[in-house]
Image: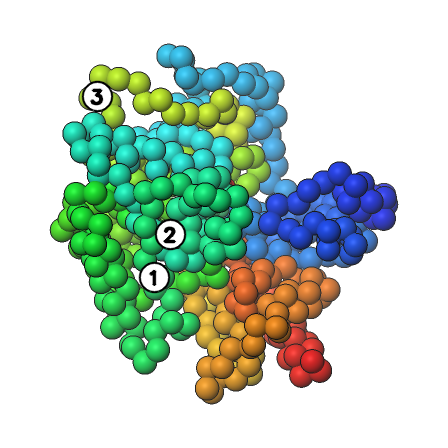
Amino acid sequence: MSNTKINTAEMQALDAAHHLHPFTNTGALNKKGARVITNADGVYLWDSEGNKILDGMAGLWCVNMGYGRKELTAAATAQMEELPYYNTFFQTTHTPAAKLAEAVASVTPGDLNHIFFANSGSEAIDTIIRMVRQYWCIKGKPYKNILIARENAYHGSTVGGTSLGGMGGMHKQGAPLLPGIERIRQPYWYGEAGDMSEEEFGIACAKALEEKILAVGPDNVAAFVGEPIQGAGGVIVPPANYWAEIQKICKKYDVLVAADEVICGFGRTGNWFGSETFGITPDIISMAKGLSSGYLPIAAVAVGDRIANALIEHDDDFNHGFTYSGHPVAAAVAIENIRLMKEENIVEYVGKEIGPYFQQQLREVLGEHPLVGHIEGVGLVAGIALVKDKATKTFFPDDIDIGFICREHCFNNGLIMRAVGSRMVLSPPLVITKAEVDELVQKAKLCFDLTLESAAAL
Ligand SMILES: *Cc1c(COP(=O)(O)O)cnc(C)c1O
């Protein structure tokens, strides 16, 4: 399947001359040359040098049904020919938007039965920010507009998403941020709990929310926003009691709960949504990545009855939306993606079969490795903490970028794993087989061995 017709050096030169990359030191990249990906099938990618690479990240946590799905391409082609575009602003709709709203509502938990479309996770988050604030305005409480989120959360890269997220590196650039956002500590047990048990730490982190609500005044807090599992923050799985406590506190102070399901949604944790895995009953959720398996950009906000009814009964426009909200071609692909997921029972496969196997193999093959301090994950998402000394839980000093070293070894040995600081993260396509999981885990072991050698040589 390799595509050797592409001239790597030529493509790298073009890229360096004109392409500014997201989340990248472009100057450094230009000196080295970007890796050119040419084609893909199933869980594998090929680059312009003919290397076959196992994609342990499903692109960017999104290619859930795997590469090369003819059903998705066919859905796009057919819709492209029938109606490539029309808007949904001015009292119009079309079949893909109406049918996708129904399809999404058929898989969302609880009373999240109304769907607002956007084109990216960031836009979905911006929609949540504006919609929950508008909700409280409709309810006669315009002052109830503060959003509480968490340190090291990722909610996207628009001004709204950056402001809501808790990424220090992002906050340093493009300031000032949006006002009306407060943050609390993240529930990162392995890294930040000290001597506390998981249970004690779960309570302590939820307590931080209560303290923050009381500090700013319950009548000023619109919503708490959190990812069921923090993804881009390094795959941080909260203690088992955490979300139930959070939910209780939000209820007590009448604070809305917004779950950012952009990664957890669409089967990643073994249920359709991470909210089900963690027992969250959100008032509103954002979704994107897995919605179309990344084949086309599309996102959605699922809105519970409380907020949806307020918007519907309020006799005024909601002045928000995007030119491509509910884009027919992207919607057609998402409809087909959901149909395929149901037909192949993929969520059950992740929850009962491949997810548990993946988690068990990671722990069995990598758990004892001297570099591995801790492994956490649910379903087909995992975070692995790399440490200098396992017994004393000593992290590498700041001047050794162990994650970067490990990621390079992975790249050079046919595996894509992402590094978040010193944490290695995995989020493979949901269609991965047991044999492919075995291959992934064996490759990871080899790369951890090489990383250990590199670290010793420093
Ligand atoms: C990726 C991500 C976003 C942003 O989505 P984009 O499509 O990149 O704008 C928001 N929230 C979470 C949890 C994400 O993982």
Real-space CA distance between mark 2 and mark 3, rounded to the nearest whole angstrom:
29 Å
As helix, strand or loop, the secondary structure at mark 1 comes to loop
Q: Amino acid at mark 1?
A: Arg
- The image position of residue 419, as x and y in percent, is 57, 63
Mark 3 and mark 1 in contact? Answer it, CB < 8 Å.
no
Residue denoted by label 2: 227
Whether residue 76 appears in this view of the structure is yes
Q: Residue furthest left?
A: 252
Q: Amino acid at mark 2?
A: Glu
Residue position marked by numbered label 1 in the rendering = 185
**Which mark is in front, 3 or 1?**
1
Q: Residue at x 51, y 77 (%)?
A: 395
Q: Quadrant of the C terminus?
A: bottom right
In the picture, the disc for residue 209 is: none
Classed neighbour count for the residue bearing mark 3: other residues with Cα under 10 Å, few (<14), some (14–19), many (≥20): few
Mark 3 CB near ligand 1 (8 Å cut): no
